[in-house]
Amino acid sequence: IELRAAGGGKSGELMSLGVALAASTGRPARALWWMEAVRAAQRVEPGDQREAPEMGAAIASLRDVMALLARGPTNPTESTVLRQRQSVLEEVVRRCSRHAAGGRVAACSVAPRVLAQALGNRMLVEYASVDQRLVAVVLDGGRCRLADLAPLVKVREAEAGLRVALRAELVAGSPGASQIALGEAGHAVQDLVWAPLALPHGREVVIVGDGPVVQTPWALLPDLASVTLVV
């Protein structure tokens, strides 16, 4: 598990480097290729659980232990026993995962021209984090361009503000100051990650997020309120 997590981090660095090199040479299609290639390599189909029955049994037992802990042990002794059992089972899962056969890597990336054909009249906006900045590749009608958007720290701050405003609006339950704050927070995110792209209105958009925009509530961005999105 640890090795796979470390590998995921290295693949992100590789994508960042590839996109940066493509941007420095003015090749947006190549930047899109790097994004697609790395993400395709990260999609791994899980191996057959029948090949690791010990790990399957340990995972099932670990779920049971966690459920008992969640309900709350009746006394300190039971809590101690359950915690010890949890540690043992986690070690079994960790050991088995190191020796388990890897899953089959998903199909390799799709060339930008093939993506354009599959998209039809839709636009693709694919984000990536490069050198502490958020960038995006736009693929529209076979034409590809790369946009440098904003520093990651500013995007994270705006995204956090939008989530806070959304929670405040849900708690308030009625129009008022919280609704105004939510609109302002949506505009703040939009100004960083969407408005600079200057996309035509009224088109269906396919969005592939990365970094701080992976969980963006896109429908809360004012310009996207009536846009058909595929995220």
Image (tube, rainbow, N blue to C red):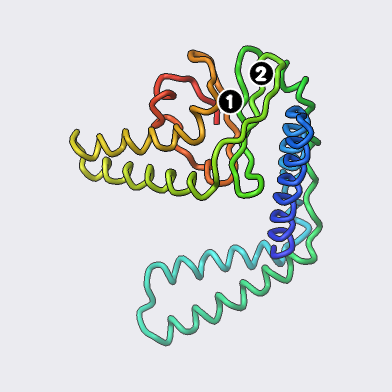
Q: Please, what is the three-letter code of the amino acid marked with disc 1?
A: Val
Give me the residue at 56% from left, 36% from top: 149
Residue 150: x %, y % from top left: 54, 40
In primary-sequence order, the first of circles 1 and 2 is 2
Mark 2, secondary structure of its residue: helix
On the picture, is 97 further left or further right than 62? right
Within 10 Å of the Cα at label 1, are there few (<14), some (14-19), or many (20+) other Cα atoms? some
Task: Please say if 21 is above or below 52.
Answer: above
Residue 67: x %, y % from top left: 46, 65
What mark, if any, has residue 17 been given in the picture? Answer: none
109 vs 95, nearest the viewer: 109
Mark 1, secondary structure of its residue: strand
78 vs 167, nearest the viewer: 167
Task: Please say if 9 is above or below 137.
Answer: below
Task: Please say if 227 is above or below 11.
Answer: above
Does the rendering let one see residue 56?
yes
Does the rendering let one see residue 44?
no
Say which residue label 2 marks: 119
On the picture, is 9 further left or further right than 77? right
CA–CA distance in space, label 1 to label 2: 8 Å
